[in-house]
Image (cartoon, rainbow, N blue to C red):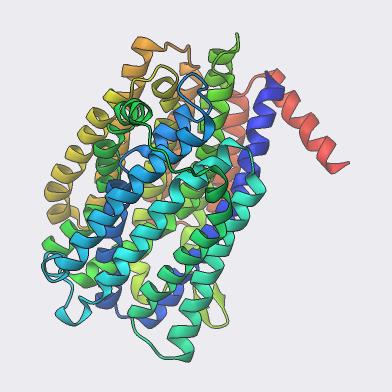
């Protein structure tokens, strides 16, 4: 079993390299933007990208999840038909929605509080969405074929082009926020062209109605589910802008972005986890392996959560060439970061629990769960933001992910029961809440000095090692560590 878990960790690491490098390079744009643009301008960028995030789900409408599920199903059809059918389906819908965005760009701009002189940006937004939609299924194909290096290379190239053009257009050509979207469009188009040889290799002229119906039945629930999930990630921005102002929104967004470190971990795990559980689902010890995966994921994520929470205020103030990670005008929102990190940890638990949905083809439950999470998020935002400001939005995100993870756990246990290590998971969460409470007590009393931070981190690691890990697991980790040292 440990060898299979080792393979999962290896795949996670490979995908993690591209995810970490790519997201980190992209994250470098946050201090760049916040040191150049006013919070109001950054607020406009935030609102438009929230719109893009939502439309990304609509353009694909679950065909990526369906392809992941049925790509190797020989009974469904041949390899090319299984690839071509969802690809053409995404192409047609993408063309329709691109046309709608271009025709109604003024109305869309008004609804997003985008100044009239920036409405032309929605032309680029439509093209970005189109290029990204056409790249979605080819990227799934690379994951299925275990071509992690190629997947990683294309993702990193996309981000490098995006970052380079941002720097060039804004610093050299002195462009405004339009440079952000020009850079993104160029990166998306180039990525699509890089994928073109792989697309042409599998694409044929036929469109199978039977394959489409089967995929649509499995994939379509991921449309409302995806919308619910993305709403959880972005709906707090327009609500924040409505209840406060663009200045507060800009500060919140910059600090929310600091949750990227946990999001990176969850993303790289998800890239490896989905092909892994489909491959292992028929093995005799599959459920025992999946149980251990949940424990180890929670353990690793908890260490990341505590370490980053303790030292985040030091990280954001660290200067490189006279610039900090985020501009001083944004530092007031750093207290929301631990809550956002915790929220993404629960998102990771949700990802673990999706194994049962794919294996048993029970995607119909997914939109109900994500819908519940989105409703909790929206209601909570309207209640908490007027009371506690940015922290209210952060708590709302956390609440929604707790609802999603809990809901998926209870439902999947009914048709794919797994005996998880509940005692160990409970202990991990106990220590997270204990050390989190100590952190906020010291922070708000101006007593969170560097010595206490290191002390808290060490105590957390000792507590986890002593109370959660058993002797076999500690021995295994020690052997792996000594092997790597040698």
Task: Report which quarter residue 115 is drawn in.
Answer: bottom left
361 relative position to 373: left or right: right
Q: Is residue 1 above or below residue 302?
A: above
Give me the residue at 14% from left, 53% from top. 387
> Where's residue 60, x and y in %?
34, 45
Q: Quadrant of the N terminus?
A: top right
Question: Depth check: 302 or 407 in front?
Answer: 407
Can residue 437 be seen here? no
> Where's residue 177, x and y in %?
33, 79
Question: Depth check: 253 or 424 in front?
Answer: 253
Q: Residue furthest bottom?
A: 173
> Where's residue 221, x and y in %?
27, 31
Q: Residue furthest right?
A: 486
Q: Is residue 448 above or below residue 297?
A: below
Give me the residue at 75% from left, 24% from top. 475
Can residue 480 be seen here? yes
Question: Depth check: 74 or 381 in front?
Answer: 74
Question: Depth check: 59 or 444 in front?
Answer: 59
Give me the residue at 89% from left, 41% from top. 486
């Amino acid at each position: 079993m440990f060898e299979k878990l080792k393979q999962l960790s290896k795949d996670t690491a490979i995908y993690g390299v591209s995810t970490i490098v790519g997201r980190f390079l992209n994250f470098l744009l946050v201090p760049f933007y916040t040191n150049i643009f006013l919070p109001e301008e950054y607020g406009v960028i935030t609102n438009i990208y929230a719109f893009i995030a939502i439309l990304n789900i609509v353009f694909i409408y679950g065909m990526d999840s369906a392809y992941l599920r049925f790509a190797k199903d020989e009974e469904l059809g041949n390899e090319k038909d299984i690839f071509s059918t969802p690809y053409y389906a995404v192409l047609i819908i993408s063309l329709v929605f691109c046309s709608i965005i271009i025709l109604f760009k003024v109305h869309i701009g008004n609804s997003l509080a985008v100044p009239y002189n920036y409405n032309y940006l929605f032309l680029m937004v439509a093209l970005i969405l189109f290029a990204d939609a056409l790249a979605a299924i080819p990227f799934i194909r690379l994951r299925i074929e275990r071509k992690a290096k190629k997947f990683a290379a294309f993702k990193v190239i996309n981000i490098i082009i995006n970052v380079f053009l941002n720097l060039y257009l804004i610093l050299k050509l002195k462009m405004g926020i339009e440079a952000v979207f020009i850079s993104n469009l160029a990166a998306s188009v180039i990525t699509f062209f890089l994928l073109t040889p792989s697309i042409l290799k599998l694409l044929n002229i036929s469109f199978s109605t039977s394959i489409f119906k089967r995929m649509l039945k499995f994939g379509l629930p991921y449309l409302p589910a995806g919308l619910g999930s993305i709403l959880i990630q972005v709906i707090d921005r327009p609500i924040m802008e409505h209840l406060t102002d663009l200045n507060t929104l800009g500060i919140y967004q910059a600090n929310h972005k600091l949750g990227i470190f946990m999001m990176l971990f969850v993303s790289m795990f998800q890239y490896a986890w989905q092909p892994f559980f489909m491959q292992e689902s028929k093995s005799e010890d599959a459920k025992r392996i999946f149980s251990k995966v949940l424990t180890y994921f929670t353990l690793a994520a908890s260490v990341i959560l505590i370490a980053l929470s303790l030292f985040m205020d030091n990280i954001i103030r660290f200067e490189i060439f006279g610039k900090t990670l985020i501009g001083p005008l944004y530092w007031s929102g750093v207290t929301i970061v631990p809550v956002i990190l915790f929220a993404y940890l629960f998102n990771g638990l949700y990802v673990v629990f999706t194994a049962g949905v794919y294996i048993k083809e029970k995607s119909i439950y997914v939109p109900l769960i994500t819908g519940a999470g989105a409703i909790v998020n929206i209601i909570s935002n309207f209640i908490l933001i007027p009371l506690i400001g940015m922290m209210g939005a952060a708590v709302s995100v956390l609440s929604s992910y707790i609802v999603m993870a809990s809901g998926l756990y209870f439902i999947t246990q009914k048709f794919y029961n797994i005996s998880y290590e509940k005692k160990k998971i409970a202990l991990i969460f106990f220590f997270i809440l204990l050390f989190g409470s100590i952190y906020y007590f010291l922070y708000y009393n101006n007593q969170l000095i560097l010595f206490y931070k290191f002390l808290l981190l060490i105590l957390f690691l000792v507590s986890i090692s002593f109370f959660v890990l058993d002797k076999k697991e500690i021995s295994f980790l020690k052997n792996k560590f000594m092997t790597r040292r040698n």
